[in-house]
Structures are given as structure tokens and as C-alpha cells.
Image (cartoon, rainbow, N blue to C red):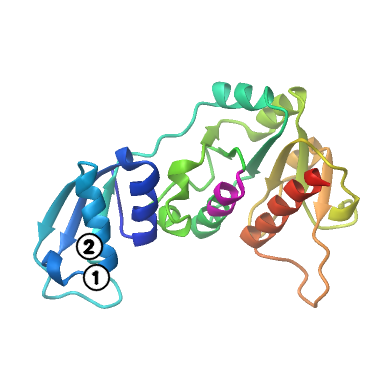
Amino acid sequence: MQIISSLSAISHILNHKPSSIKRLTLFGPPDRASVRIQQIVTKAKEVGIVVDLQPNPKNKSNDTFEPLTAQVAPFHFEEWKPFSEKLSQQKESFILALDHLQDPQNFGALCRTAEGLGWNGIVIPKDRSVTVTPGVYHASVGAVETLPIVQIANLSDSLRKLKEAGFWIVGAALGEKAQQLSELPSLEKVVLVLGTELEGISPLIANTCDFLIKIPLQGKVQSLNVSASGAILMYALMERLKK
């Protein structure tokens, strides 16, 4: 079980996947809670979720105290085979693959963007990679519960299998080998690969990619945060398909 305290995440899960929340804990009398918290508690009771009332801690800190928390079931990762086979059969599919990303805030932000834009799922390695934590729930505003996420043993092998199934592998990179985003053809089945915050995608993964692309920057900053880059590229790849 995980404990999350983001009201946005709790609200999103209540509205779209309430079975994932096993219990809510409200600290303090309900009639003194904010309107938003009262609405969440009311919704929880409507769908049969237990709301546990606890006294307001006397030693609370304004920086750390959260008046409402949710106990969430262990996160369910999708199985690789049915996930990949289903998307391989679709005419248009968009998958985000993360090459050993480490930061929970970036992972959560990418999950939020992918879910919001309608991407089909995210693939992450099991080892040396971020996983779904309370911080990821917070940064994704609960989107991890409504977005398929798959853990795989070997990212390179999984990308090769997706390529054999008709996907184009597009890696975000810097350097001379990376072409401008505008030079990329319109692709119906795409895996966008993003690397670590400092090192980018590994040479092995880069060699697996069909295309390496970069975002044209006009200012003095030479690179963007991985979650910002991912958001731009995810949107751009879907928009290119519409043209």
C-alpha cells in the first residue's frame, strides 16, 4: 500500500478509478475541512470507500501536515505481451519509453502529459529506473492510475520487438546525428524514447532508434528538462500525424 496526500491525485483517482483507493483518512472534524476536501470525502462515501476520522495532530507543521490522505492499493503494472500485441494491431499507436529515468517528479510530469494527450502507455525498465511512488502520484495528479505503464527487463530488446511489429523508434537526442523535429516524416506507430536527466539515451538505445530528433532552441539555453522536452515532442508527434 502507498499513502498519497495530493488532493488533485486523490480526486482524479476517485473520479476515474475509485477501486484503487482503499481508505481515506481525514485529520480533524469534517465540518472544518475545506470545501474541496468535503467534496472528496462525500464522493468517497458515495462509492463505498471507508473514511477514517482522526484528531488533528497538535504538533502539526504548516509545511508538512496534510489534512487528508488516501491509502492506495499496490500499483498494477500492465503485462508486456498483451500491451504490445494490442497496440501492434492498432493503426495508430503512441508509446513513451524511458531509458533509465531516475527522477520521480519528471516521471510523474511525463505520465501526466502522456495521459492528457492520449498516448497509449509508458514503458520503463525494471532495474536502475524510477518506479511509481507517492511523489509520482503527486506529480502526475493521479494520471498513473489511468495510463498503462509496463515494466520490462530489457528496454533494447523490447524496442526491437516493437520495431518488428511496425513501430518507428524515435529517440530524443542532442548532437550532429540528431535531425530537426520538422524533418521527421509523419508516423502512425511511434515509440518516443527519452533518456536520463544528465546523460540522455544510452548509445545502445540510440543505435536501436530509427530516428534521432532534437528540439530547435532559439535562446542561450542548450537543453530542456526531460519532462519539458517530452511534453513538446509528444504533442508535436501527434500533431504531425494530423497534417
Distance from the alpha carbon under mark 2 to that under mark 1: 6 Å
Q: Is residue 113 a member of the stretch shown in magenta?
A: yes
What is the crowding at mark 2: few (fewer than 14 residues within 10 Å), some, or many (at least 20)? some
The prevailing secondary structure element of the residues shown in magenta is helix
Mark 2 and mark 1 in contact? Answer it, CB < 8 Å.
yes
Vertical position of residue 43 compared to residue 17: above or below: below
SS type, badge 1: loop
Q: Residue at x 80, y 48 (%)?
A: 240
Pointer 1 local density, CA inside 10 Å: few below 14, some 14–19, many at least 20: few
Residue 213 numbered tag = none
Q: Quadrant of the N terminus?
A: top left
Instruction: Confirm whether residue 6 shows in the render.
Output: no
Q: Nearer the viewer, residue 16 or 115?
A: 16
- Among the 4 quarters of the image, the one containing residue 227: bottom right
| Type of amino acid under label 2 | Gln
**Residue 133, image x and y in percent?**
40, 50
Q: Visible in this render: residue 174?
A: yes
Q: Residue sitting at 79 percent across and 39 percent down? A: 209
Identify residue for label 1: 34
Asked if residue 160 is positioned above or below residue 223 in the image, the reply reads above
- In the image, taking residue 33 as reference, residue 191 lies left or right, namely right
Residue 33 among magenta residues: no
* Residue 38 - label: 2
For the record, the magenta segment spans: 112-118
Q: Quadrant of residue 226?
A: bottom right
- Residue 62 versus residue 207: which sits nearer the camera? 62
Q: Is residue 3 left or right of residue 143?
A: left
Compared across the picture, whether 175 is left or right of 49 comes to: right
Q: Secondary structure at mark 2?
A: helix
